[in-house]
Amino acid sequence: MGKILIIDDDSGFNLMLKTFLTKNGHELEQAFDAKSGFKMVISHRFDLILTDLRLPDIDGIELLKKIKKVQKATPVILMTSYTGIKTAVTAMKIGAFDYITKPINPDETLMVVQSALDQPTVSSEDESTPPIAVQEQLHITGTSTVARQIDDHISLVAPTNMSVIIQGESGTGKEFVSKKIHEKSLRSKAPFVAIDCGALPKDLAGSELFGHLKGAFTGAIGEKKGQFEAAHGGTLFLDEIGNLPYEIQIKLLRAIQERKVRKLGATQDIEVDVRLIAATNEDLPSAVANGTFREDLYHRLNEFKIEVSPLRERGRDIEVFATHFLALSNAELSKSVRGFEPSVIEKFMQYPWHGNLREMKNAVKRATLLAQGPYIAASNLPAEIINYYPRAKPALSFPDLDSGTDLKVITEKNEKELIVRVLEENRYNKSKTARVLNIDRKTLYNKLKQYGIEH
């Protein structure tokens, strides 16, 4: 694990990121401006530096140049809002390793941090390979009927101001879909701001969404612009919306309906013009039924819904995505692997991909690194893929007619077998199982209790 320096003037964000990275085994130091951060760079040796692009004293680009003069080999990751991506890409040409957008996505942040710690810094003079973050923008959507339907829905809803819910499992590319909606909308020149509701600490959620004034609470050392205000005129993407605290849901509904927000500690409202896109891997109607998600907020957000299918249901898209991730991995790892052996594609088509595109990307990257010849072999794949063999679906069984022809007994026996099989296929994830069975979670729990199924 690495020794990491975070340079950011937002104390709340600084604390959240430090807590997250510390929990993942890293040693953290903090600085709240460029001057104090650079002093620490001079006096200490760090394995990685994360710095905000906009600092109160000097620009993050200037700080990057100074850091590279004293610790040239130390990777630097820039942190920026979506509107600062062009500047961040420019910064990578002068030595930054990569960038991450605020609010951070925990999984992606951890992956970028680990990549920076694991690999030697890419030379900024090598223009033949695009920077890692630029490669990530080269995303494809697939060619299947499902993929075309998603594209059609994006094209239909994008020019409108309708709120959209994007439903899909984790790792299926819901944020990518939301960005495509924004890029095809009349708001494309305005900001796209993404926030992971699942990563928001309960006591900071209100501040992150709506902002705060100096002194509004302990640790509020300055005024903060909320994400609604930052997205004014553009699109606000709320990922994993089901994780928002109930009291914040109330404030969110008011902000959507009245197009106004009030910063913590303020007495006046601020008018905002924002298009809302929400994403979730949860069953929101069940959450509404259980009382954990407001029904009025759900209906306000659900003006249009796009279902993003899991990778295992995407048919021929599986090979398309694998080939795409191979190209990215070749560029990042300076390899020249041409493709996959037929047995690998067969494994890919059989594997359930519970982690979806994110899992496939990591699996292909690892296999590319291990490949010794021109093609990826099955032996290069992670053990869970190599050792996976699809279980034959049990045929619906019927009791011996000599024991009776009770239709209820037959129905219950088959129902129990079906529930057990779907539970196993979805690794006992209740939400996914309920969706596959087309029932709500409450009904599923009742069935588990009725049939004595261990869960």
Image: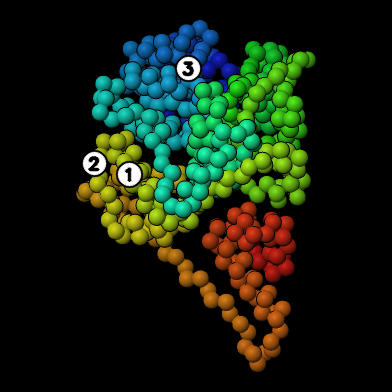
State how far apart marks 3 and 1 are (Cα). Answer: 31 Å
| First in sequence: mark 3 vs mark 1 | 3
> What is the CA distance from the residue labelled 2 to the residue labelled 3?
34 Å
Q: Nearer the viewer, residue 319 or 292?
A: 319
Residue at horizontal 56 percent and vertical 33 percent from the top? 159
Mark 1 / mark 2, whichever is N-terminal: 1
Q: Amino acid at mark 3?
A: Leu
Disc 1/disc 2 C-alpha distance (Å): 9 Å
For the C terminus, the image quarter is bottom right
Snapshot quadrant of residue 231: top right
Q: Residue at x 73, y 20 (%)?
A: 262
Name the spot of residue 151 as percent of width and height, x first: 49, 43
Which one is nearer the viewer's eye here, 280 or 334? 280
Q: Which residue is mark 3?
A: 53
Q: Quadrant of the N terminus?
A: top left
In the foreground, 161 or 314: 161
Q: Tell me residue 133's x, y (percent).
A: 39, 30
In the picture shown, does residue 428 fall above or below 246? Answer: below
Q: Amino acid at mark 1?
A: Leu
**Crowd around label 3: few <14 · some 14–19 · many ≥20 (10 Å):** many
